[in-house]
Amino acid sequence: QVQLVESGGGLVQAGGSLRLSCVASGSNFRINAMAWYRQAPGLQRELVATISSSGTADYQDSVKGRFTISRDNAKNTMYLQMNRLLPEDTAVYYCNAAASPTHTWWQESDYWGRGTQVTVFS
């Protein structure tokens, strides 16, 4: 029903920037809240930032002030602007979305992208 595809990952030097994108596609769905997660090798997947359908954002403390989450509802796209990157930001970044069928908005399912690799070197 809903597919999420991340892009924008890559290799960047510490202090640099990247912008991740997540595009949702499918038919007869409505995206509700969205989030970025990340997972480093050997560690649990952790929440990076969330954004509500109305644009209210929240961040993990470690990225607050450096990362900005945003969304363009008309394009079904979410972004994560990452500035002043640190080696500890190295991880696979995953897009997450809660989505509902268009005509049964009270039903909601959780969807995940396959991730995009971000590697920060010093």
Image: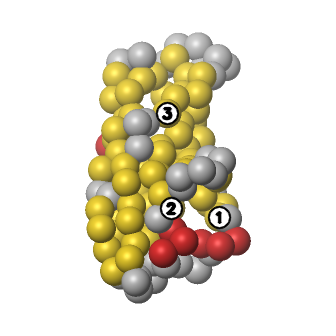
The reply to whether callout 3 and callout 2 are in contact (CB within 8 Å) is no
Q: Is residue 70 depicted above or below 2 in this figure?
A: below
Q: Where is residue 19 in the image (x, y as percent from the top left)?
A: 35, 65
**Label of residue 112 in the image:** 3
Q: Is residue 13 depicted above or below 117 in this figure?
A: below
Name the residue type under label 2: Ile
* SS category of the residue bearing label 1: strand
> Looking at this view, is 109 or 106 the one in front?
109
Q: Position of residue 84 (x, y in %)?
A: 45, 83
Q: Label 1: few (<14), some or many (≥20) within 10 Å? A: some
Name the residue type under label 3: Trp
84 to the left or right of 5: right
Q: Which of marks 3 and 2 is nearer the N terminus?
A: 2
Residue 47 visible to an observer of this rendering: yes
Residue located beneath label 2 in the image:
69
Residue located beneath label 1 in the image:
59
Q: Which colour scheme is used?
A: secondary structure
Q: Label 3: few (<14), some or many (≥20) within 10 Å? A: many
Image quarter (top left, top right, bottom left or bottom right) of the N terminus: top left
Residue in view at x 34 percent, y 22 percent: 26
- Between the residue at mark 3 and the residue at mark 2, the CA separation in whole angstroms equals 17 Å
Q: Position of residue 85 (x, y in %)?
A: 45, 77
Residue in view at x 30 percent, y 68 percent: 11
Q: Earlier in the sequence, mark 1 or mark 2?
A: 1
The reply to whether callout 1 and callout 2 are in contact (CB within 8 Å) is yes
> Looking at this view, is 67 or 42 the one in front?
42
- Between the residue at mark 1 and the residue at mark 2, the CA separation in whole angstroms equals 8 Å
Q: Earlier in the sequence, mark 3 or mark 1?
A: 1
Residue in view at x 44 percent, y 61 percent: 80
- Between the residue at mark 3 and the residue at mark 1, the CA separation in whole angstroms equals 19 Å
Q: Label 2: few (<14), some or many (≥20) within 10 Å? A: many
